[in-house]
Amino acid sequence: MIKTTQTPLNKEEQRRLNQIVQQLLDSNDSVEFRQPVDYKALNLHDYITIVKKPMDLGTVQRKLNSNTYKTVEECLDDIQLIWDNCKLYNGSQSWITKIAEKLERLFKKNVRNYLPLVNLPQFVPKQKDAGADVFQEEPQDQVSYNDKVEFSNNLKQLAPEQIGLIVHMIQNTSPNAFVEIEGEKYQIIVDYIEYEAFLKCQKQIQTWIAGDTINKKVKI
């Protein structure tokens, strides 16, 4: 976890974490991740030598309900570990890694929705062995720092009516991206804009800057 400070796990955070875990458990894609990997039955004799800390959704749920976690980040790190372990052992091209990546995107989306003030866990690339590939985190639901800077700078170049449309687009999809700072004044937190909404807003802004006319029918 990049975040240096830890978020104490109170009843409200525990309730939200339970919602995140339950949504993962309810997903049809999570069957393989609901219980510990039965590496003996599957004849995966090298599993415990490669995966140093096995983790699964059922274990996370039990630890959460038994108050084992003391901070929000401890729980989120365990969930992220499930996807990391799968990538590490199975490789980037495996069918089950693709499922893990899909669930990871759902997980991160739910963290942004339920716990917007908590930083997302980050996948730390590891090697399975000297000849294995180093796995990279999926960039599909991540906005780069340079893109965020470009977005903020481009926003300042827009006309008031264009800014108003962008604000409306973001409000419809990412209400957590707005923080009230004074009366009716709001600040946009770029980190909290949903990924797809960010891409659409960025594309519209770039169109305007390129010289095209404002499109008031743009929708997100």
Image: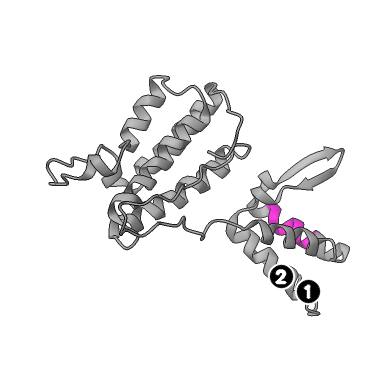
State left or right for residue 107 relative to residue 162: left
Q: Say which residue appears at 66% left-offset and 49% top-offset.
A: 191
- Secondary structure under tag 2 reads helix
Count the marks: how many? 2
State left or right for residue 134 relative to residue 17: left
Q: Residues within 10 Å of mark 1 (few under 14, many from 20)?
A: some
Tag 1–tag 2 contact (CB < 8 Å): yes
- Secondary structure under tag 1 reads helix
State left or right for residue 54 relative to residue 74: left
State left or right for residue 120 relative to residue 212: left
Up the image or down, 10 lies above or below 109; here it is above
Q: Nearer the viewer, residue 170 or 6?
A: 6
Q: Say which residue appears at 53% left-offset and 21% top-offset.
A: 11
Q: Main secondary structure of the magenta part?
A: helix
The amino acid at mark 2 is Gln
The amino acid at mark 1 is Trp
Q: Say which residue appears at 49% left-offset and 22% top-offset.
A: 70
Q: Nearer the viewer, residue 188 or 53?
A: 53
Is 94 a magenta residue? no
Residue assigned mark 1: 208
Residue assigned mark 2: 204
The range drawn in magenta is 164-171
**Where residue 2 sits in the image (x, y, percent)?**
57, 40
**Colour scheme in the image?**
one colour
**Where residue 187 sits in the image (x, y, percent)?**
79, 46
